[in-house]
Image: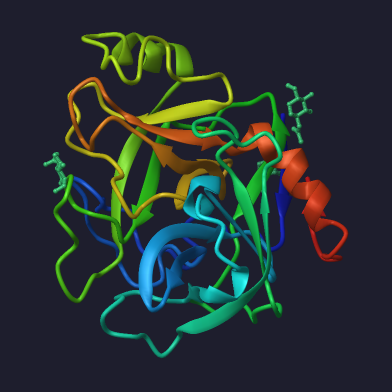
């Protein structure tokens, strides 16, 4: 059974135009399809994605903050579509605090919470995604979506006007993912690099993947007709390479930690 936490329930098809189909191997997302996607910026430069999970909280990857700059240098951009062509729905928020998971170390517990200085007002382009506190059910189907403004291949930046990219990827559990990563293992990565609190998404043949600059962004899956944040973009060996699917933090493993920090500040969360 699914134990989800929602600030606002976003039903599939409610506002989301019919699902068709970067990132690597993806395409332009229709405007407004992924209203929880945020861009985390420093000096006007996008460096990581993130997901809005309530009016005042964003979840992202801990490695986005590996240099401990003071939080006032960051801006969280919500309701954005093309980074080089600001949308009327765009809201830029400063950051009250950044909470790195206490067990974060290079490739483990790569998850962080960012509290905005003020709650944002939800609009068609700015809405939170539900997440899992815990669950003993898997998604209705294992096809999920990853979105972001990251590079479209290793070292190939997204061309102007930098339209939000989306790609559909297949969930791969950590054991099956290790089987792939153990094929010609990269000596720097080693064998069995994928831990039980991670999940992979992509394809054995590669080609469709997240890449640099997508880090921290959402892997969104359909659970019983509602969008849930299943993963946070964390790491990979290159982008879109065969036998090297993207590796994501499995948000379910951190759902209670997220809930614990947020419930002190947020009165309107619904547990299901
Ligand atoms: C950190 O890891 C330890 C040891 O595995 C575990 O007991 C603890 O619950 C973890 N902390 C959090 C906040 O998950
Ligand atoms: C990307 O660029 C860096 C620095 O220029 C280089 O070291 C690296 O090999 C490049 N990676 C790929 C996959 O081309
Ligand atoms: C699925 O959604 C329906 C309609 O919203 C609800 O009645 C049902 O309890 C949900 N099932 C699960 C397993 O969450």
Percent position of residue 145, x then y: 38, 46
The front one of 44 and 166 is: 44
Q: Is residue 271 visible?
A: no
Seen at 72% across and 33% down, the residue is: 134
Percent position of residue 5, x then y: 73, 49
The front one of 216 and 172 is: 216
Seen at 31% across and 20% down, the residue is: 188
Quadrant location of the N terminus in the rendered image: top right
Judge left or right: residue 249 versus residue 137. Answer: left
Where does ligand 1 appear, by image quarter?
Answer: top right
Judge left or right: residue 10 versus residue 170. Answer: right
Percent position of residue 53, x then y: 64, 59
Q: Is residue 176 visible?
A: yes
User: Residue lying farthest bottom?
Assistant: 88
Seen at 45% across and 11% down, the residue is: 175
Q: Is residue 113 above or below residue 8?
A: above
Q: Is residue 185 above or below residue 109?
A: above
Q: Is residue 207 above or below residue 146?
A: above
Judge left or right: residue 14 versus residue 214. Answer: right
Seen at 21% across and 46% down, the residue is: 24
Quadrant location of the C terminus in the rendered image: top right
**Location of residue 237 by image quarter:** top left
Percent position of residue 9, x then y: 65, 59
Which coloring applies here? rainbow
Judge left or right: residue 51 versus residue 158. Answer: right
Q: How many marks?
A: 0
The front one of 117 and 177 is: 117
Q: Is residue 107 above or below residue 114?
A: above
């Amino acid at each position: 059974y699914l134990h989800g936490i929602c600030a606002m329930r976003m039903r599939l098809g409610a506002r989301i135009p019919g699902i068709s189909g970067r990132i690597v191997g993806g395409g332009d997302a229709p405007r407004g399809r992924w209203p929880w996607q945020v861009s985390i910026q420093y000096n006007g430069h996008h460096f990581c994605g993130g997901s809005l999970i309530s009016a005042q909280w964003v979840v992202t990857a801990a490695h986005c903050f590996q240099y401990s700059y003071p939080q006032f240098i960051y801006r969280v951009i919500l309701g954005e579509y093309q980074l080089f062509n600001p949308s009327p729905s765009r809201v830029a928020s400063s950051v009250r605090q950044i909470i790195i998971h206490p067990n974060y170390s290079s490739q483990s517990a790569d998850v962080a919470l960012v509290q905005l200085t003020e709650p944002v007002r939800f609009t068609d382009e700015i809405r939170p995604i539900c997440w899992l506190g815990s669950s003993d059910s898997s998604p209705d189907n294992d096809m999920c979506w990853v979105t972001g403004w990251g590079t479209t291949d290793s070292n190939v930046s997204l061309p102007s006007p930098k339209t939000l990219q989306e790609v559909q990827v297949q969930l791969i559990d950590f054991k099956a993912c290790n089987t792939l990563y153990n094929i010609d293992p990269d000596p720097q990565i080693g064998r069995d690099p994928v831990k039980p609190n991670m999940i992979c998404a992509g394809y054995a043949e590669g080609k469709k993947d997240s890449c640099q600059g997508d880090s921290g962004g959402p892997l969104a899956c359909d659970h019983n007709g509602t969008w849930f944040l299943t993963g946070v973009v964390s790491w990979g060996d290159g982008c879109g390479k065969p036998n090297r699917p993207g590796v994501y933090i499995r948000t379910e493993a951190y759902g209670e930690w997220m809930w614990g920090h947020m419930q002190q500040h947020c009165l309107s969360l619904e547990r299901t």
